[in-house]
Every structure is written in structure tokens, then in C-alpha cells.
Image (cartoon, rainbow, N blue to C red):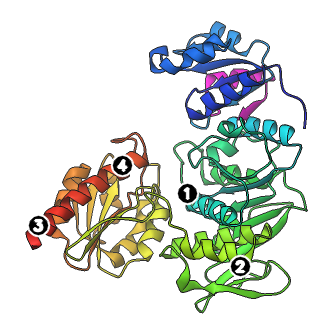
Amino acid sequence: MNGLPKKVAILGFARSGRALGEALADRGVAVSVWDDRPAADFPDAEPLARRGVAFFFGGGDASRIESLLAGADWLAISPGVPLSAPVAEEARRRGVPVLAEFEVAWRIAEREAEGRNRWIAVTGTNGKSTTTAWIADALRRAGRPVALAGNIGVPLSAFLSERAPRDFVCELSSFQLEAVDRFAPHVAVLTNVTPDHLDRHSDFEAYARAKYRLFAKQSAADFSVVNADDPAAAAAPTPARRVPFSRKREAPGGVWALSGRVVSAVHPLEREILPAAKIALPGAHNLENALAALAALECLDAPADAVRNALERFSGLPHRSELVAESGGVRWIDDSKGTNVDATRKCLEGFPDASVVLILGGRDKHGDFAALAGEVARKARLVLTIGEAAAAIEGALGDAVPFERAGTMGEAVRRAAGVARHGDTVLLSPACASFDQYSNFEERGRHFASLARAAAQREGRHGA
């Protein structure tokens, strides 16, 4: 691992850019930061400015970009900033490598731990957060020092203040993977690849190629865990040992679930791990997540007791098929993380037929809403649409199921409370991004949960 650079320019001063700036300044690296937003948005930049970090807020012309990049060895780009940004394009023109914040942080961590860390990385369209957290949970149960980092919420750079070796369990988005270069995880997991973020990637093939970058620098001594049921994931090129998982068929050399049994053949002797009914989280999508996590843990030789305990007891993450209220036989489920068509479709699979009042909508990410029609027709008895994508969703679903234009979350919950009956589930699984009405999917989920609890309380008082 090469030594530290003399200067790094950072593009984007959100969580990852700020954490990286602090880590670099701690190591005596010169830092300059660019963000198009005005300085007034960053009152907490002052401590770094006093340490010599140069800030370029509010955008600007070529001369300001030249000052930002002058003497820079690397440009570290935050995941929310596209590679087509003018600063990134100018860096490439000058021959300055454009690297993800994650890549820079990984290089620092590996240099300081002298290769003693273990790196487990998870990507995919759906299920990557749950799978990442599930792996980390099992490793903690095994007594391993674990850092849960990346797209799951805490930038990798934020862990650089502690230099002891650890198991880094990292979630990586396609945005982050676009700008990794040397990152080589010991275990890489690809949960699935279905159309998503086509508002940023030029087409599905470009999106898939970004995901495949997770495997590019692995070696034959590493492991690539792939979903054998997903054609795009199964086709991922890798130099590492391929370890498949499947919930539909046997997966030689990997793990699978058939006839109510979860089985592993990652090691030479095939063995049953546990009955599938004991998996902690319900639904076909969570069975896939559990299998992906199990495959990774088998590659890491995690202790069997810790693995089984995690598979049976993991409590899940907020906004992923989370029960937030229940009253009068009606369950309210927050799946606000269902931000694309495939996520919503898989979530619906776990419900009885004709039992769902479904809330769909938000900002369209160029998803194929027509692909929802079959599952919606089976599982939902009413669709309530919200946000910018409402008309597109209604047009794509046609007459698959009755729908109503609610517009806002408040109106959708009010209408759902009025029509839901004993045995129904009111499900927020929007198949869309949140950015038309909310700052992120977490805020959307919290708003739904608050409204749902209030509606359930009213129903409880009315029923009493």
C-alpha cells in the first residue's frame, strides 16, 4: 500500500466528504473542498478551516476549480456527486485520479492496519442494507471487532480515528462503485441487479457494470457471493471463487433453501444449517437476504452457533418491511426503503392474496411500473398513489387493481384507515425515490409510521 498523498481535493461536503476531510487533516494531508452549495449551509466547516482546509463553496468558474485542484494528487468524490460534474471532468482532463471517498478511506485503513483487516462488501439493487447488517450482527455474536460502514449510514472515513484491525462490513452503492479503483474485498456479495437509478446511469447495462466493479480487483483467494436466481447477478464476472445462493434450487458450492431446509455446501460437506421457518425476518426477499448473509459468513468460517443465532434472532432494520402499528386486525407496514419496482414486487410476495392496501409513488427513477401489475393484482385490493410519479404508476397499472390518487402521505393514510378491514395490511412500499416530498426515505418512513400509529390509536378507541 502506497504512502499518503500530499494533497487531496474533495468534491462534496456531506457526511462522507466531511469525515474524509477530518481524517486527512488528522494525518497532515493538505485538503481542499468544493461544494456547489453556499457557505451558509456549512456552519460546522469552521474548525477544519482553522486547521488549514481550503473551502470553495457556492460553485464558481474555471479559476476557482484550478485553485481547488492545484497540487492535488487525488480528487475524492462523494457518492451523491455524479462523475460528470464539471470539477470531476476537469480533474480527469488534468490527469488527477477521481476516487470514491470509500476508496481513499480504504487505502488509508489498509496502510495503517498493514493488511490485517478483513473486508466484506455488499452491493445490489435490493436487500444490501439488510444483508450487510445481518453479516455484521453474526460477526459481533462471534466476538469479532466489527465496523459497519459505507452506504448503510456511516462513511468509512469516520472509522479512521481508530487504527486497530477489524472486520469491515461495508455496503456499497453503484454511485460509490463507479469511482473505486483498487478496492479488493475478501468477500464480495451481490444480492441482485434489477433496473434502478436509471436517472443517473445511462442504461441498465451501465448500472450492472457499476455493480460488477465490486469484484474487479479480487483474487483467486477471495470469494464472490452471487444470487443464482438473478440472471444479471449470476452473470457477474469475477476472478474469485464464485459462491452462489438460491431460494429456488440447489446451488452447488454455495447455499440454498429447499423443502423447508437451509443448506450449505460452501465447505466440502453439505449440511443443514437450520429450518427455513426459523429465519428471523419474514418474506421471500428476506430469505434471499439471509442466504446471502449465510454464504458470506460461511466464506469467513464464522462459528456455527453465532451464525445460527444471528439467522434466528436478527431484528432487521428500520423502514424495511417494519411493522409500525396494529389495531383492529389491521397491520401497518413501513417499507419506505422499497424505492424501486423490484423491491416492492418482492415485498408484496410475502402477503396473502387480496389483503394489501398499497401506497405507491414518489419520484420516478425511470422504473418499469408495469412490471408490478401482476403482483399488485394478486396481493392488493386498493392502490393509493402519491407524489410526482402518481400518474405514471396509474397509467402503467391500468385496470390491474382499483386505485385512487391520494397525492400526499397524510391523505393516503387517512383513506387507507377508512377502507382497511380485519386481516388487511396497509403497506407503504413506494417503488420510487422520496425526494419529491421528503429529504430521504427515512424521513418518509418516519412520517408514515407517525400517521399510521395515530390512525391505529383512533381505530382502537373507536373499536373500544
Q: Where's residue 244, x and y in %?
A: 73, 73
Q: Position of residue 182 (x, y in %)?
A: 83, 43
| Residue 195, label in figure | 1
Crowd tier of the residue under label 1, counting other residues whose Cα lies within 10 Å: few below 14, some 14–19, many 20 or above:
some
State the separation of the CA atoms marked 3 and 2: 48 Å
Task: Please report whichever mark, 2 or 1, sits nearer to the chain's N-terminal start.
Answer: 1
Depth check, mark 3 against mark 4: the one in front is 3
Q: Position of residue 94 (x, y in %)?
A: 78, 19
Up the image or down, 104 lies above or below 136; here it is above
Query: What amino acid type is highlighted by mark number 4?
Result: Arg
Q: Amino acid at mark 1?
A: Pro
For label 3, the residue is 461
Is 237 above or below relative to 276? above
Q: Which residue is mark 2?
A: 255
Crowding near the residue tagged with mark 2, few <14, some 14–19, many ≥20 C-alpha atoms within 10 Å: many
Residue stretch rendered in magenta on the structure:
82-100
User: Which residue has dot 4 on it?
Assistant: 444
User: Nearer the N terminus, badge 1 or badge 3?
Assistant: 1
